[in-house]
Image (cartoon, helix red, strand yellow):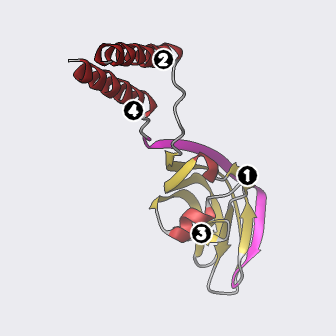
Amino acid sequence: MGRSLLGAVATSVILAAGVIATQTAKADTINETFSLTVSPAASLTGMSDNFLAGTAFALFDPTIGTLNDVSFTLSGSGTLTGDPSWDFNPFVSGDELAGENFTPGPIVIDIADTDLTGATALAAFTGSGNVIPELDIYADNDSTFSTDGALSGTVTYDYTPAVTAAAVPEPASLMLLGSALLGFGVYRRYRRKTT
């Protein structure tokens, strides 16, 4: 009888410690916002890259977990004058994201590059500090154009938080101590009876 009681107490202590210390990581998200304003209208030349910089946003800090996926959106409006058509491609840390092609006139930009999971894309958004997004505007001919616009963007980081050891709450630690003392007492009593 004594041995089975001792075994039960030891098992309950081990199970209680395991339940208290177990912590599962659940996916989480972080949203970063930025803006890109072209005012007054910028005069640009085709056959070359024309990078327009936005406001900085924070890169994903790898010390808080593992980056699984990034979503990038850029939206706004402006006016494009010139000839014939121009490509608008956002860049982050030198990595080109999905873009759009526009012809002269009023433009509405609604660029979304979601579910970025490739190693290059994830690396472009990972690090410490901030990054400045850029919008590259170019054409395949030598014409000039001007554009203005007010754009805003969002970057969403989908990540799995780093698992850290859970602190044992005070009542649980007292329960563990009490269970250990009870087990020790039962063991001593059992030893006295057998000798």
* Amino acid residing under circle 2: Leu
The residue closer to the viewer here, 195 or 53, is 195
Is disc 4 in contact with disc 1, using a CB cutoff of under 8 Å? Answer: no
Between discs 4 and 1, the one toward the N terminus? 4
Name the residue at 53% across, 55% down. 72
Between discs 3 and 2, the one toward the N terminus? 3
* Amino acid residing under circle 3: Asn
Residue to which mark 3 is pinned:
89
Q: Which residues are magenta?
A: 25-47
Residue to which mark 4 is pinned:
18
- Depth check, mark 4 against mark 2: the one in front is 2
Is disc 3 in contact with disc 1, using a CB cutoff of under 8 Å? Answer: no
Question: Which x, y percent locates residue 187?
Answer: 36, 19
Query: Is residue 60 at all visible to an observer of this figure?
Result: no
The local secondary structure at tag 2 comes to helix
Residue to which mark 1 is pinned:
56
Between discs 2 and 1, the one toward the N terminus? 1
> Quarter of the image containing the N terminus?
top left
The local secondary structure at tag 3 comes to strand
The local secondary structure at tag 1 comes to loop
Name the residue at 61% across, 59% down. 125
Q: Main secondary structure of the magenta part?
A: strand
- Depth check, mark 2 against mark 1: the one in front is 2
- How many other residues sit within 10 Å of disc 1, few (<14), some (14-19) or many (≥20)? some
- Disc 4 to disc 2, how far (Cα)? 14 Å
147 magenta-colored: no
